[in-house]
């Protein structure tokens, strides 16, 4: 194959009227399992949005509906005011999915060249290779790549042209730390240029550090929607940690008020509490004198676990 000579289009995406993505009371079932259950949400230009949820929460089904890979049973899904398939055909959406293999027995450059040639608004092949960090392996046969290298090739294909929406499903799986950092730096550049980035991930530290907005799904429903800080606050708990020199009955610590989680390792006690002031006051009320006392908000991972466990308990 020969490298495409397409001219680089304007750097800013086409103006969007209304939301980039719109779900309106969308449902999708597989047999007796409701994978998406009355889901309503909107995404807007320039947002970097993390899609979180435990296994079986409906993340993959939501992405399938967004990309037009499956039809909704009810409700409407629209991208840029049109259907997902029309938006994809217009080259407005780039996607990097876990499912589906790459063409084998072709080189990385040949595959990326094909991706650029098929895009209605392609970028130059060398630019795509450089942005994905795969210039040095451009001559390598695709089926000889490592898992992390395959992920970077998928990323190159997802950004082969001028997309207004980039959808990523577990994009950094298999990448080393350096590759992950470079990947997210590139994604931030895309968002800064007005593009919308939606990514599903199990790396909650990535969501905390990268996303402007976090969506938490549980059993196909939208459990939480906000910034990472808002999601942490919504969990309604704080972390408490301290060291104890004096012996104390385990039952007394477990009976502290407002506890939602308890852990003890040697002399170190780690708690989660809905009312940190009441819990700490009760510690002193037991006649204990905790050393190295720390009280802090939950991290995103702890908040995510607290929210989803509360949802399961409520069901």
Image (spheres, rainbow, N blue to C red):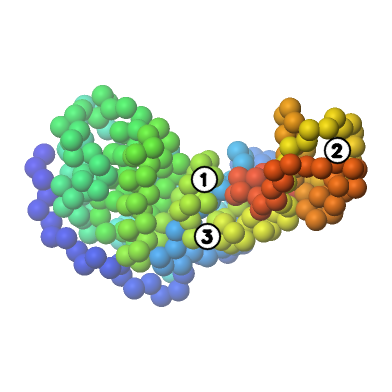
Q: Which residue is drawn at 26% across and 24% down?
A: 144
Residue located beneath label 3 in the image = 213
For mark 2, give the secondary structure.
Answer: helix
Label 3 neighbourhood size at 10 Å, few (<14), some (14-19), many (20+)? many
Residue located beneath label 1 in the image = 205
Q: Residue furthest bottom?
A: 17
Label 1 neighbourhood size at 10 Å, few (<14), some (14-19), many (20+)? few
**x then y, percent, for residue 97:** 41, 42
For mark 3, give the secondary structure.
Answer: strand
Figure label count: 3
Task: Measure the C-alpha gap from mark 1 to mark 3.
Answer: 13 Å
In the image, taking residue 158 as reference, residue 211 lies left or right, namely: right
Task: Measure the C-alpha gap from mark 1 to mark 2.
Answer: 29 Å
Q: Residue at x 89, y 31 (%)?
A: 249
**x then y, percent, for residue 139:** 15, 32
In which quadrant is the N terminus drawn? top left
In the image, taking residue 66 as reference, residue 159 lies left or right, namely: left
Residue located beneath label 2 in the image = 254
Q: Residue at x 73, y 52 (%)?
A: 237
| Residue nearest the viewer, comparing 112 with 71 | 112
């Amino acid at each position: 194959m020969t490298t495409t000579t397409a001219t680089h289009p304007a750097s800013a995406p086409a103006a969007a009227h209304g939301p980039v993505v719109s779900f309106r009371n969308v449902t999708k079932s597989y047999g007796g399992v409701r994978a998406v259950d009355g889901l309503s949400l909107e995404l807007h230009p320039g947002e970097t949005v993390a899609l979180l949820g435990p296994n079986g929460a409906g993340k993959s089904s939501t992405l399938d509906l967004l990309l037009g890979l499956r039809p909704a049973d009810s409700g409407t899904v629209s991208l840029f005011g049109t259907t997902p398939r029309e938006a994809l055909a217009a080259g407005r959406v780039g996607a990097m999915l876990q499912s589906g293999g790459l063409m084998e027995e072709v080189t990385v450059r040949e595959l990326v060249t094909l991706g650029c040639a098929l895009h209605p608004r392609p970028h130059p092949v060398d630019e795509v290779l450089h942005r994905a960090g795969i210039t040095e392996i451009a001559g390598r046969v695709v089926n000889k790549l490592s898992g992390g290298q395959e992920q970077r090739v998928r990323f190159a294909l997802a950004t082969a042209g001028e997309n207004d929406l980039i959808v990523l499903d577990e994009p950094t799986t298999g990448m080393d730390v350096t590759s992950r950092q470079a990947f997210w730096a590139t994604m931030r550049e895309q968002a800064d240029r007005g593009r919308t980035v939606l990514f599903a991930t199990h790396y909650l530290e990535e969501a905390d550090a990268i996303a402007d907005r976090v969506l938490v799904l549980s059993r196909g429903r939208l459990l939480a929607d906000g910034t990472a800080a808002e999601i942490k606050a919504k969990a309604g708990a704080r972390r408490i940690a301290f060291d104890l020199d004096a012996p104390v009955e385990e039952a007394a610590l477990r009976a502290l008020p407002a506890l939602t989680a308890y852990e003890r390792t040697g002399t170190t006690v780690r708690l989660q509490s809905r009312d940190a002031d009441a819990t700490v006051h009760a510690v002193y009320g037991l006649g204990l004198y905790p050393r190295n006392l720390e009280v802090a908000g939950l991290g995103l991972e702890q908040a995510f676990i607290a929210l989803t466990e509360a949802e399961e308990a409520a069901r």
